[in-house]
Amino acid sequence: MRGRSILTAAFLLPVMWADGFAQGREVRGTVTRNGRALANVAVSVVPVDTAVPGSVDTVEIDQRELRFVPNIVAVGVGGSVMFRNSDPYLHNVYSPTGAQFTLGTYARGDTRLHRFETPGRYVVLCNVHPEMVAYVFVVSSPYHAITDSDGRFTVAGLPAGGYLVQVWLARGPPFEQIVSAAQVRNDRLRIEIGSDTGRPQ
């Protein structure tokens, strides 16, 4: 996979695994850096012992009050984002990054759907209002979440086995850690990441 960065002992990311994780139920955790919670971070959990199912995600981003709401989402490869215009003026949706796309300009009440086939981080902009920006993280697993304001996340429905845990930030490559089936039997797994998270693009 292109653009990877392996997790190193210099960074701090505590992750708590729920009791049912090894049975394929859910994983809960908290993402922090230097003891501070990281909100709006995408966490993807990729099974390594079983086939990864295709994604049928469809999430919505609204263009409202000159903002993308929410401005950070995650979908699996093959998933879609529905862009809605709720403002009383024209908006546009395009991305100059990754597999670039443009959905044109459209009026209030209209929607545009885009399916994401290539993993990566997509910066989404409006060429009518350049101050508007959103991020779409396209991850290689349908098992993913965005951290809340306290850095917490829950990923449910996982199969048993080992996993590749990926953490995506607004800049730099994802951070990754292989988690074995033996490791997930622990009540708490701590993955330590360095403090200079990622490389500026």
Image (cartoon, helix red, strand yellow):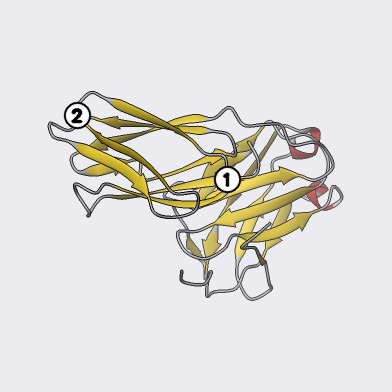
Category of crowding for the residue at label 1, using alpha-carbon neighbours closer than 10 angstroms: few (below 14), some (14–19), many (at least 20) = some
Q: Which one is nearer the viewer's eye here, 160 or 71?
A: 71
Q: Which mark is residue 118?
A: 1
Find out whether the residues at labels 2 and 1 contact each other: C-beta distance under 8 Å: no
- In the image, 7: left or right of 126? right
- In the image, 14: left or right of 90? right
Query: Rounded to the nearest whole Å, what is the CA distance between mark 2 and mark 1?
Result: 28 Å
**Residue in the picture at 19% in, 46% down:** 128
* Residue 164 drawn above or below residue 59: below
**Residue in the picture at 35% in, 29% down:** 112
Residue 86 locus on image (x, y percent): 22, 30
Q: Amino acid type of disc 2?
A: Ala
Q: Which mark is residue 175?
A: none
Q: Quadrant of the N terminus?
A: bottom right
Residue 151 locus on image (x, y percent): 49, 52
> How many labels sit on residues?
2
Residue 58 locus on image (x, y percent): 49, 28
Q: Secondary structure at mark 1?
A: loop
**Residue in the picture at 79% in, 36% down:** 51
Name the residue that disc number 2 marks: 107
Q: Which one is nearer the viewer's eye here, 158 or 175?
A: 175
Category of crowding for the residue at label 2, using alpha-carbon neighbours closer than 10 angstroms: few (below 14), some (14–19), many (at least 20) = some
- In the image, 93: left or right of 166? left
**Residue in the picture at 62% in, 31% down:** 55
Q: Which one is nearer the viewer's eye here, 52 or 166?
A: 52
Q: Secondary structure at mark 2?
A: loop
Residue 74 locus on image (x, y percent): 50, 42
Q: Amino acid type of disc 1?
A: Thr
- The mark that comes first in sequence, 2 or 1, is 2
Question: Looking at this rendering, what residue extends furthest in the left direction?
Answer: 88
